[in-house]
Each structure stands twice: as C-alpha cells, then as structure tokens.
Image (tube, rainbow, N blue to C red):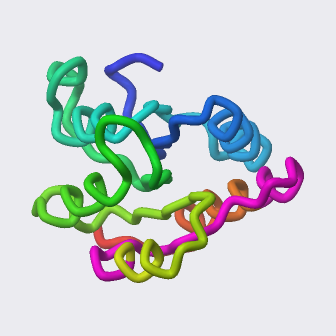
Amino acid sequence: MSDFEQVEILLVEDSARDAELTMRALQKGGLANKVLWVKDGQEALDYLFRQGEFAQRIEGIPRLVLLDLKMPRVDGMEVLAAVRADEHTRRIPVVIMTSSQEESDIARSYDLGVNSYVVKPVDFHAMTELARQAGYYWLAINRSPG
C-alpha cells in the first residue's frame, strides 16, 4: 500500500499468522481494499500520529483500528490510551482482538474506551469469520460521526 492511499482499517498485530487470517477474512468480505498492517504498538502510534516512518504520509485517520493487546515495544493498552487521549483520534472505533480472556484486560480496555473486545478463536474458520464480521459491522453497518 502506498503512503498516499487512505487507510480504512489499521490492523495492529504482531502475529503474522493472525494478521494473514484477518486480512484474508476482510478480503473475503470485500473490506480489504485499504488495510494497513503494522506489527506492533509503536508502529501503530507512528502511523496514527504521523511520526517516524509515517511522518510524510497524507493526513487522515483510519475508519477502524483492529488492535491486539500483547505486543512488543508498545502494547495495545498503551495504544488505546493514546488514541483516546488525542482529540483527532478519540472517535476512531477500536476493536481489541486478542487471545487474552483476563477479566482485568477486558475491564481496563473498556475503562480506556474500547468499542469492542473480542477473544480470538484458535480455529482457523472461526477466526476468519470473526474478522470478517467485525470489519463488516464497523465499516458497513455502524454509523460514526463525520
């Protein structure tokens, strides 16, 4: 994807396998045209706030962030907190897609303003269906403020 294209979905996922499954599901659902995959929370922050390797990208924010929690460098909770703290990004729908079923992670995510918290299934077909449904709901059904 070129830095000049508008990203609709920012996929923040350190697992290549999970990222591939998610992107395949979004593609199958007709939603993968403008997905950018970043491999950790620091890359996500750099993209969202136009820093580092993304400092020269065109302005604009994604319509949806699919966010893993457990990542190197900067974890998903830190990304979520930064997104919600900034007036330009606070309204972006953020869906946490993680393997963590810890009640403390779920509670903290909602305290920080996550829109949805989804536990990733281990089954391939269930994972692809989950990603397809999440993308479809947030991009095609849900109404976001202009």
Residue 59 drawn at (x, y percent)? 19, 36
* Residue 60 position (above or below residue 121): above
Is 76 covered by the magenta stretch? no
Residue depicted at x 60% and y 72%: 101
Hey, which quadrant is residue 92 in on the image? bottom left
In the picture shown, does residue 52 fall above or below 68? above
Q: Position of residue 97 (x, y in %)?
A: 57, 59
Q: Specify whether 88 is left or right of 42.
A: left
Q: Which residues are magenta?
A: 110-129
Residue plotted at (33% across, 60% down): 77
Q: For this view, does 81 lie left or right of residue 108?
A: left
**Residue 127 visible here:** yes
| Residue 50 image position (x, y, % from top left) | 17, 32
Q: Position of residue 131 (x, y in %)?
A: 69, 55
Query: What quarter of the picture does the C terminus occupy?
Result: bottom left
Residue sitting at 67 percent across and 40 percent down? Answer: 18
The residue that appears at 69% across and 45% down in the rendered structure is 26
User: For the image shown, how many numbered marks are present on the structure?
Assistant: 0
Q: Is residue 123 magenta?
A: yes
Residue 132's place in the image compared with 43, above or below, is below
Q: Nearer the viewer, residue 34 or 123?
A: 123
Q: Is residue 8 visible?
A: no
Q: Quadrant of residue 56?
A: top left
Horizontally, residue 24 falls left or right of residue 96, namely right
